[in-house]
Structures are given as structure tokens and as C-alpha cells.
Amino acid sequence: MTPKKRIAIFGSTGSIGTQALEVIAANADKFSVEVLTAQNNADLLIKQAQYFTPNCVVIGNESKYQYVKDALAATPVKVFAGEDALEEVAGMDCYDMMVAAVVGFAGLKPTLRAIESGKAIGLANKETLVVAGDIVMRKAIEKRVPIIPIDSEHSAIFQCLVGEGRNKIEKIILTASGGPFFGKKPNFLVNVKRDHALQHPNWSMGAKITIDSATLMNKGLEMIEAKWLFNLQADQIQVVIHPQSIIHSMVQFEDGSIKAQMGLPDMKLPIQYALSFPNRIANNFPRYDFKKVQTLNFDEPDLRTFRNLALAIEALNKGGNLPCILNAANEIAVYAFLKNRIGFLDMTALVEKAMSKVPFIQNPTLEEYFDSDAEARNYTASLIDL
Ligand code: NDP
Ligand code: MG
């Protein structure tokens, strides 16, 4: 019998983290949970730890350490707290594969530490590659660590590439649902409120990525993510609006042939694939029925209205620390929008300002990425008095 794959879930209380735990619970003969981490949601972390009895848990918010420690006192689970602990635990020997499901820039350091320690990565946290994709991928190659995408579009492309060896990619086609405001114009978007923007038509996800989907920033971040994952030039990455979210993305090879990966929108599938790769595991997830969804539509993205996507394409083309600046400003802007502090279109204005304010560096070191991130965050926050 093959030994169980030992999994560490960073961001276990989030949308991806909880779905990863569902997949593992349904396949307890194949996987064990060794690390769980949360930022604030101590109660869910405790419940998860009581169920899965991992080697250890990390609660990011240090003020909740004693609460978690007391709740798990009767179990063998070790309890750690704080940002540094997150990184240290990522370097521990007790697991084989990290599911990187922390949201935002905070996921970068633990993921880098996991790669340095030779762990396989199931990558949901796209911001890691947006910020420092060159450094992360170089390190992964050096350490011979596989980075298996969980983001559904990138999982689709990864699946399309299986068996293609060194066959050249002409381009990839990333599909986008278009989000809740597909077809709308700026005069509508200017009045959009938080609760409306949080209603995604096809996917149920964490708050930050749901807002990014509504502004199309998510697709821009995914273009940058794809560049690094699949070693592509910017002009090899195309975005197509596909409102049904049945085709999760496509690869066009140099003979013009296009491969697509299809299915109902359900993140458990790409999560399961990343965990079990190169094998597939039978499951009873709902199946796509051609009789029910008979029409698949395609459209061009509206870059004039959804200017976040245009800004991300600019960052993709220019490279250097510009994607890092874009990402940092966007995290602050989305946070402010979620707090009802700014309007929907203000998010774009803030990102644009930060991109022209923070000095451009063509080949940043990791330290310079951290500095650019901090500078972009501080500058953006100062504009809205956060
Ligand atoms: P959620 O907001 O639902 O979950 C985020 C997780 O990260 C939670 O466990 C949260 O803990 C933890 N966390 C939040 N802030 C920090 C921090 N500063 N330090 C450490 N941990 C932190 O996000 P999602 O699950 O939606 O997304 C996670 C990542 O996956 C994102 O990068 C997203 O872009 C990507 N992704 C998500 C998809 C989805 O369907 N949700 C699809 C494709 C990609 P707590 O609960 O305690 O706050
Ligand atoms: Mg995606």
C-alpha cells in the first residue's frame, strides 16, 4: 500500500482551505492532514484540528494563541501563533505537500519557505506568483519542486498540457466568467456597492477574489500567474469572456489545435487534481450535462470599462516590480471597498496612482519586492486616509 500523502493546508479556514479539507476527508485512505493555519477564525481552526488531529496548527493573530491552545489541550496537536510561526512551520519535516490557500501577499513567505524545504506546492494563492513569480519559479526549478496550480484556469491548462512533452504552445486562452457586472458600463459601476459586488454568478469564493472577479483584476492577476507557471510571453496569453464557466481554459498548440478542459464550476475538482496528480480520483461531484447547458458563449473583455484588466496587462508587459505594485495597491483598494470606504471605480484609480508613483525596478531582488509592496501599500492607504 502506498503511504498517505501528508498535507499542510495554509489558509485552512478559507474557501479553498475548507474545500481542500472536504476532498481530504473523502479520501482519508490517500491523504492525512498535518498542518492547518488560520489568521483570525480560531473557532473553525479548533474544530478542524479536533477532527483531523494534525501535527500542528498556526493561528496568525497572536492574541488568539491562548484560546486555541486551551481548546486543544486534550489533544496532541501543537499550537503556534504569529507570522514568523507560519514561515517556520512551512519549513517543518512533518508534511509532503502544501496547499497554499492563504489570500494575498501574506502567502508569499511561507510558500517560498516550503519550496526551499523541498515540498510540493498546490498553489491557489496566485498573488505569490504575481508578486515574485521569477524568484518563486527559479527556486522551484532549483529545488525540483512541482508547483501544481489550483486556480481553475491554470489547472485546466496544466491538464491540457499533460502528455504534450515539449510540444510548443502557440498561446493559451484564459476564460473569464465576466463576473456580476458583465456588459455594464462605468455609469452603472460608479454606484455599485459592496454587497452587490460580492454576488458572483458562478463561483462561491472568499471576499477578496470575488471583488477581483467583479473588477476583472482577477483575470489580470491570472494572466501574470500563467506567464510564470507556463513560461510564456505576454502576447501568448489571451482572455476570452465565457459566461457559463464550463470551459475552464484552453491551450492552442503550434499546429493550431486547441485543447480545452471542461466541467461544472466546482473548485473541489482542481483541488483534488492537484492533490492526486498525476492520478485522478473517482468522485461523485455533479457532472456537466450537455442537455442542460447547450450553448457556450464567448466574448471580448471590455478593457475600457474594466480598466483593472488593462492595468494588469500593462504590468504584465512591463514586468519588473510593476505587478508587485499593482497587487499591493489592489489589496489595499479591495480592503477599503469591502469596508465601504471607497467606491467601485476608485479601486482602479488607486491602483493606477500607485503604479505611477512607486519607483520602477526592472530586476528586483526579493528584498526589493518586499520594499515595493510596503511602499505601494503605504502610499495607497495614505490616499484614502486608512
Ligand atoms: P478566503 O478569504 O476564503 O481564505 C483565506 C485564508 O487565508 C483563510 O484561512 C484566512 O484565515 C487566511 N488568511 C487571511 N489573511 C491572512 C494573513 N494575513 N496571514 C495568514 N493567513 C491569512 O480566500 P480564498 O480561499 O477565496 O482564496 C485563497 C487564495 O486562493 C487566494 O489567493 C485566491 O486568489 C485563490 N483562489 C481562490 C479561489 C476560490 O474559489 N476561492 C479560486 C482560485 C484561486 P481566516 O479565515 O482566519 O481569516
Ligand atoms: Mg481562477
Image (spheres, helix red, strand yellow):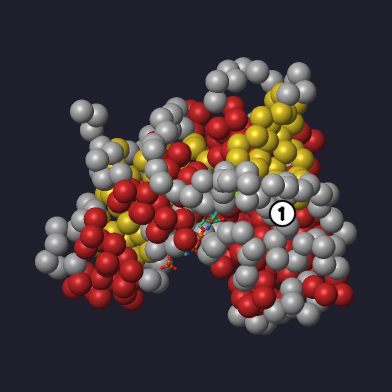
- Secondary structure, mark 1, is loop
Between 237 and 369, the residue placed more toward the observer is: 237
Image-based side of 88 in relation to 289, left or right: left
Q: Percent position (x, y) of residue 115? A: 43, 39
Residue 44 shows in the view? yes
Instruction: Residue at 63% x, 70% y: name it.
Output: 199
Locate the C terminus by quadrant: bottom right
Q: Residues within 10 Å of mark 1 (few under 14, many from 20)?
A: many
Between 97 and 271, the residue placed more toward the observer is: 271
Residue 109 shows in the view? no
Instruction: Residue at 51% x, 46% y: name it.
Output: 287
Locate the N terminus by quadrant: top left
Question: For residue 377, what is the image quadrant?
Answer: bottom right
Q: Percent position (x, y) of residue 368? A: 61, 50
Q: Circle 1 is placed at which residue position? A: 243
Instruction: Residue at 57% x, 51% y: name it.
Output: 265
Image-based side of 376 in relation to 73, left or right: right
Instruction: Residue at 70% x, 61% y: name it.
Output: 179
Q: Of all residues shown, which one is farthest toward the left?
A: 74
Image-based side of 369 in relation to 98, left or right: right
**Is residue 315 shown above or below 115?**
below
**Is residue 175 shown above or below 66?**
above
Figure disc tally: 1
Q: Percent position (x, y) of residue 310? A: 81, 54
Q: Percent position (x, y) of residue 331? A: 62, 65
Q: Looking at the picture, which amino acid does disc 1 mark? A: Pro
